[in-house]
Image: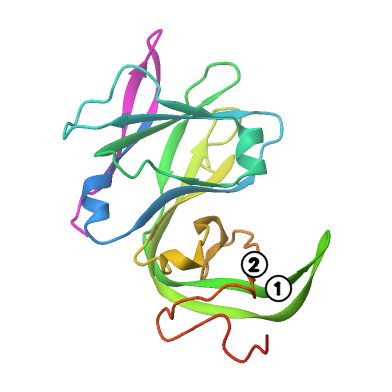
Amino acid sequence: MPEGFFKIYPDKFGRNDKGDVLSLDLAAVRREYRYAGLWYACDKNEETYIATEMYYGTQATDSRPPDVTEELSENSFKHSPRYAFYPDAHRVWIAMRTEKHVYCKLKAFTTQTENTYINYKVIRNRGTGYDTLKSGVIKGSKALFFRLGVEDGSGALDYNDTVMFIAFIKDLPPADWNFDPACFGIQKLPVLVPAFLFPVRQNYSNWLGQNPLDGVTR
């Protein structure tokens, strides 16, 4: 990953509102990592509601587009805390604003490298439910991530009002796993990791020397 693949800088929005924007070079990220996303961790200020604005550039440019491509409310982020960046975009700019249209300050904390993992269950469907035949953890590949602190301006300047992570994952499982990256875990990253379900009726390719059906009697 080249140095300077992201930066945070002050910017102006719409009605001359001012705040920080994070600019991320997705084209550079994709040379090494197959997944890139923004993960919601926690809200430490329940009095303020944060909207996340995504501005995507489909061409190689350093200029942020004037119009928001996609907006995520905090409630939608709490319900579905893993957001994957568009796979065909060259760059994404990320800004946060409160319900009072105050744009937030952002801070990137130390970049860390850890390994991914998948909590999983092998299941046999039974009507409206299922039986669990096996459960375990699959060891994944390398991941790079950093904490993104959000300061909404309502109190002390601690970049702790909302906590998110920018996550990059090197390898994904084979296509026949039909795996949802929302079920990835990253070591030392404090985000809830749901178990991924593998129906026993299917066959799965090996990945990194592992197969979810190893040891399962059908």
The answer to whether 45 is drawn above or below residue 134 in the figure is above
- Front residue of 184 and 121: 121
Callout 1 touching callout 2 (CB < 8 Å): yes
Q: Position of residue 63 (x, y in %)?
A: 21, 26
Q: Given the current orientation, which residue lies at the most extreme top position?
A: 15
Residue 187: assigned label: none
Position of residue 52 measured from the top left corner of the image (x, y, whole percent): 50, 31
**Amino acid type for the residue under numbered disc 2:** Leu
Element on which disc 1 rests = strand
**10 Å crowding of disc 2: few (<14), some (14-19), many (20+):** some
Q: Nearer the viewer, residue 160 or 94?
A: 94
Residue 193 placement (x, y as % from top left): 62, 63
- In the displayed structure, would residue 43 be above or below residue 94? below
Nearest the camera: 80 or 13?
80
Amino acid at circle 1: Ile
**How is the model colour-coded?**
rainbow
First in residue order: circle 1 vs circle 2? 1
In percent of width and height, residue 194 lies at 65, 62
Circle 2 SS class: strand
Label 1 crowd bin: few (<14), some (14–19), many (20+), radius 10 Å: some
Q: CA distance from mark 1 to mark 2?
A: 7 Å
Provide the residue designation for mark 1: 123
Residue 113 vs residue 100: left or right?
left
Say which quarter of the image contains residue 118: bottom right
77 to the left or right of 124:
left
The residue located at (24%, 32%) in the rendering is 58
Q: Which mark is residue 197?
A: 2
Q: Which residues are magenta?
A: 1-20
Front residue of 117 and 108: 117
